[in-house]
Amino acid sequence: MRIFGRMAVTAGVAVAGLGLAAPAFANVTSVSDPEGDVPDIVRLSVNNKQAAVVLTQTYVDIELVQVESLYIMWGGAKHYRINRGNYDEDPALETRFILVTPNGEREKQCADLRVRRSVDLDRTKVIVPRSCLGQAPNRIQGKGVASMGLSLSDQTRLTKLVARG
């Protein structure tokens, strides 16, 4: 009986330990996208870190994507949009960071904004430092859009609100 009692206590502590670890991941969310569009988005992940927001969009075939837009949203009409055009294969010249408000939109400078496009992994990762997100609150949502040509596109649903962690 004593051994069983100790095992039960040990198992209870292990389960409680797992429960305590879960909030550490509360700043990450993702949304899957149905198959069949061209270009085809598979998944959008949002990691709302203390120092930066990381958006990762995965595709069936990233080489079909000419323009992609990743959104950092928090309700209402205000949001940030990161546009990346794949016209000249030069992401430094083709990335735009835009603040959208009810009064319109304006491009913002963000020297530390990083966009990593991985053809091998069929994904784009955007890292937006907190210093560039002056308007964004602690809880945000993400959305992704990709297009090829003038009429083919795919977009994700909005992710759940995710707290800064």
Image (tube, rainbow, N blue to C red):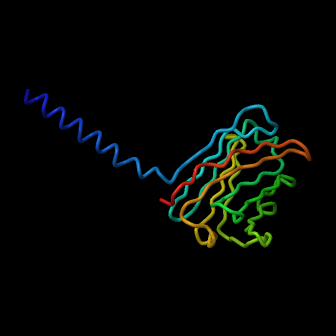
Q: Locate residue 134, reporting x and y percent.
A: 62, 73
- The number of numbered badges drawn on the structure is 0
Q: Is residue 28 above or below residue 4?
A: below
Give the farthest residue toward the right: 150
Quarter of the figure with residue 17: top left
Quadrant for the N terminus in the image: top left
Quarter of the figure with residue 105: bottom right
The residue at the point 63 percent across, 59 percent down is 127
Give the farthest residue toward the front: 76
Q: Locate residue 47, reporting x and y percent.
A: 56, 53
Q: In this view, does 115 lie above or below 156?
A: below
Q: Locate residue 92, reporting x and y percent.
A: 77, 62
Q: Locate residue 40, reporting x and y percent.
A: 76, 38
The residue at the point 65 percent across, 45 percent down is 44
The residue at the point 23 percent across, 35 percent down is 11
The residue at the point 82 percent across, 37 percent down is 38
